[in-house]
Image (tube, grey):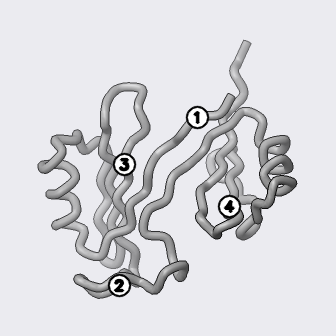
Amino acid sequence: MLSIGDVQVYVSDFPKALRFWADGLRLRITERDVGEHAAFARLELGEDEPSVRLISADAAWEPGTRPPHGSRPTICFDITTDAFDETLIRLLEHGGQQAGEIETYSELRMVTVADPDGNTFDLIELPADPQ
């Protein structure tokens, strides 16, 4: 099974972006963490729908500018699967490239994959269904 996961939006001005996404689209903030050097918020579109995650990194670009094309993601999304190894192999066999190592978070594996044009997404392993 494959599904589209969350959409991550990297922003330079976290409060301004949060107002836009939460108030402008009336998305519900379900998680927020604002630290000294970075900020994160999860905004829900609806029940059982992918969420929008706003991420303001420590080294965000200057407001009003954009990073050079391909130098860092500005919007990223997840593709989730319960067949992680098979899906990754198939993507690589069909012209994709693995960008970095496979990482494990909370017992889930994930890896960034680039399509033949260099567009990236995170492939994330869904937990096995307990039967």
Label 3 belongs to which residue?
Answer: 52
Please tell me whether mark 1 sits on a helix, a strand or a loop: strand
Looking at marks 1 and 3 on the same chain, the residue that comes earlier in the sequence is marked by: 1
User: Which residue sits at x=22%, y=41%?
Assistant: 27
User: Which residue sits at x=83%, y=47%?
Assistant: 90
Looking at marks 3 and 4 on the same chain, the residue that comes earlier in the sequence is marked by: 3
> Which amino acid type is marked by label 3?
Val
Please tell me whether mark 4 sits on a helix, a strand or a loop: loop
Looking at marks 2 and 4 on the same chain, the residue that comes earlier in the sequence is marked by: 2
User: Which residue sits at x=76%, y=60%?
Assistant: 96
Please tell me whether mark 2 sits on a helix, a strand or a loop: loop
Looking at marks 1 and 4 on the same chain, the residue that comes earlier in the sequence is marked by: 1
User: Which residue sits at x=58%, y=34%?
Assistant: 3
Between 59 and 85, the residue placed more toward the observer is 85
Label 4 belongs to which residue?
Answer: 115
Q: Quadrant of residue 35?
A: bottom left
> Which amino acid type is marked by label 1?
Ser
Q: Are marks 2 and 1 in contact (CB under 8 Å)?
A: no
**The label number, if any, that marks residue 61 in the structure image:** 2
Label 1 belongs to which residue?
Answer: 3
Q: Residues within 10 Å of mark 2 (few under 14, many from 20)?
A: some
Dot in front, 1 or 4: 4
Q: Is residue 130 above or below residue 93?
A: above
Dot in front, 2 or 4: 4
